[in-house]
Image: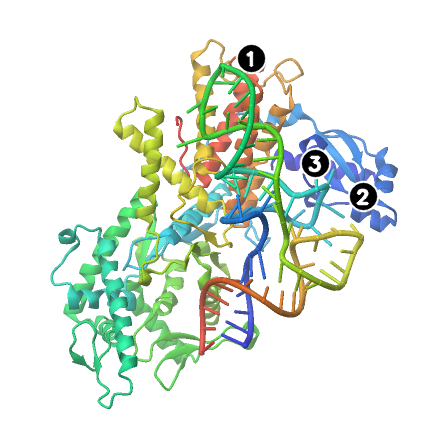
Amino acid sequence: MSVLNIARQDVVKILKTAGIQIALSDIVFPPDYKLGDFSFPLFGAAKEAGIAPAILAQKIAEKLKPQGLVEKIEIAGPYVNFWLKREEIVREVVTPPVPPLKLRGGKKKVLPLRLRGSERGLRGGRVMMEMISPNNNKPLHLGHLRNAFLGESVARMLEAQGAKLIRTCLFNDRGLHIAKSMLAYKLWGAGKTPESERMKGDEFVVSWYVLFEHKAREEQKIAAATLRSPRGGLKTAATGEVSGHTLQAQAEELVRKWEAGDKETLELWKKMSGWALEGINMTLKRLGMKFDAFYYESKLWKAGKKVVVEGLKRGIFKKEKSGAVLIEFEEALGLPPKVLQRADGTTIYATADLALGPEKFSARGGSAFGGKKYKLAHSIWCVGQEQNLYFKQLFAIYKMLGHKWADQCEHLSYGLVFLPEGKMKTREGTVVEADALLNKMYELVYEEVKARHAHLTEAEIGERAEIIAQAAVRYYLLSVSPKSLVHFDPKASISFTGHTGPYLLYTYARIASILRKAKGSNAPLPAQAGQPHLKLRGGEGGVTNDCEWRLIFSIARFSEIVAQAADQRDPSQLAQYLYSLAKTFSDFYEAVPVLQSEEPTRGFRLALLRSAREILGRGLHLLTIQPLEEM
RNA sequence: GGCCCCGUAGUUCAAUGGACAGAACGCGAGACUUCUAAGCUCGUUAUGGGGGUUCGAUUCCCUCCGGGGCCA
């Protein structure tokens, strides 16, 4: 329990003695720190008492006596404001150095995890986070970046709450999209390879996809023009040959051949999805994304077909006259029917997902884990909000199939990334590719770093530039609440000043710089001097001004901010908080000297800065951002 | 057509039903020259329209307008 929560309980006790019953959550923060540390508005209580709030405030004023962590109480119109005992809070926030961040893999104390919309505790439960889940026919783009950062950030925040996270990624490596790339390559590729074209594998593969879409559209135009022709035959725009099969039909044929195990088709598929995967993996590596297991649609679809057969047998699924298999939901759910298998018997990604859920929750551990046992308490799918309906349907299907874990499935949904011209569309070439964006940011930062630190080697500049560039992109995408659309203008690059990732890094680096310099000086840090507690009374190195107090109070809020952000799956709350923390530090930095101040104030301020650095560092880590000691 | 999300300053984003709606970018001015000026200070401009619930609405409800998404 955080020290602020203990203080809140004291506030509740104090109000109780005045005959006012409130909950912890009724206590708010005043709009200005000068008004106090906590506040309680009396409107509700006044209504119950049948008198004006300000009158009630005056009436209870003398009954309100400070106790516990509360030092002072004041009435301000309809509000009761509380000041905390700064020395006590300081002891919690500053004196015991904040325990170092436990990274993945380390032993950690298990704390109860609250799940959104549920009071059910989840002690040390295993939570799976599936993220990115790309199609194997194109490079990762800006939308995938949002997905990756959101998923990873929520994963880290849940870890901070005591959950054990298992990170997974599903590759949609088969199906119509890859068939389209394959067909175009087959028709017009003539032995070209990523090497021969000097392209990254994923870029190479998507170029055929884009070509397919282009040719298919041309074909449609011609088809529309020849629709009334008595012969009715279609010309394929690409080859000019008369053919009864459209490109679309040929791509669908390729899917059938793939599922039938056609050797030539499988070989081509292996080659192309391999190229795509190689390119995607390079980007994932650059992003530092690490996974505990991968799923492949190409390995799941057969198991999905079995579920279809079984579902038909049990009468849960229905076969239409066309041959397509679908499921209908009970009316109360308000969900439209969902097709699970095409009329021609080929599968779609919903088919594979029928098998994915059981695979994830299998007590034996799925094949993707190499037989490891993962008993999941919860499973999260981090996927864009355009799939909201789909996931409602999918989870409902799991339930109808009788899976007990259906209620432990969660769709972590987020808004699309929008460009000035609208939604990004691969087929129209309006996409901001992840690599291109990161490269552009890198170049901009590189020049900036070089201008500031001429003495660094090329490699050192490059390393810093990459971290700063990524921090900018990561913070930019995470500072917007997940459900909002992100508007991104590629022409206006992401800023490095103001409310940005680099500002946070800069703040961290300035704190680190002071602490480095302090180590070189004679006066030891209090902790190094072996003092169990700082002397905190006025004039002895305790809180001497508001700048310090605001920084301390801000630090004290960290753990509950993280808990709430984790609970609501919303890293933007943490992002906003970290910015305000950095801002508060900047005020402190401008207002008071640290190294030049007198002992014991100097020691106190150094200890405070160590806490600030620790919290800022932990916060950045939870936002997937790597701090820099020097910038 | 049905369902879902969104509409806040010129732009991009904040605001568990509470105190004068906050930032940042942009634009305009300025200070220090002590620990990193990617910083700090001051100024500038906003809740799409109309109803309702409430002591109090950016927030909840209805409706219209606008943007986006999903389903057929």
For the question of whether residue A105 can be seen, the reply is no
Image quadrant of residue A551? top right
Kindly identify which residue carries mark 3.
A38
- Marks 2/3 same chain: yes
**Of residues A444 and A69, the one drawn nearer to the viewer in this rendering:** A444
Residue A395 is left or right of residue A354, and the answer is right
Residue A550 is left or right of residue A170, and the answer is right
- Marks 3/1 same chain: yes
Q: Chain of mark 1?
A: A
Q: Secondary structure at mark 1?
A: loop
Instruction: Please tell me the numbered disc located at residue A597.
Output: 1
Estimate the x, y position of residue A280 in percent, counting from the top left.
Answer: 28, 51
Q: Chain of mark 2?
A: A
Image quadrant of residue B19? top right
Kindly identify which residue carries mark 2.
A20
Which of marks 3 and 2 precedes in the sequence? 2
Q: Chain of mark 3?
A: A
Mark 3–mark 1 Cα distance, whole angstroms, equals: 31 Å
In the rendered view, tell whether residue A277 sits above or below residue A174: above
In the rendered view, tell whether residue A356 sits above or below residue A474: below
Q: Residue at 24% across / 77% down in the picture? A: A246
Q: Quadrant of the N terminus of chain A?
A: top right
Estimate the x, y position of residue A333 in percent, counting from the top left.
Answer: 54, 72
Q: Quadrant of the C terminus of chain A?
A: top left
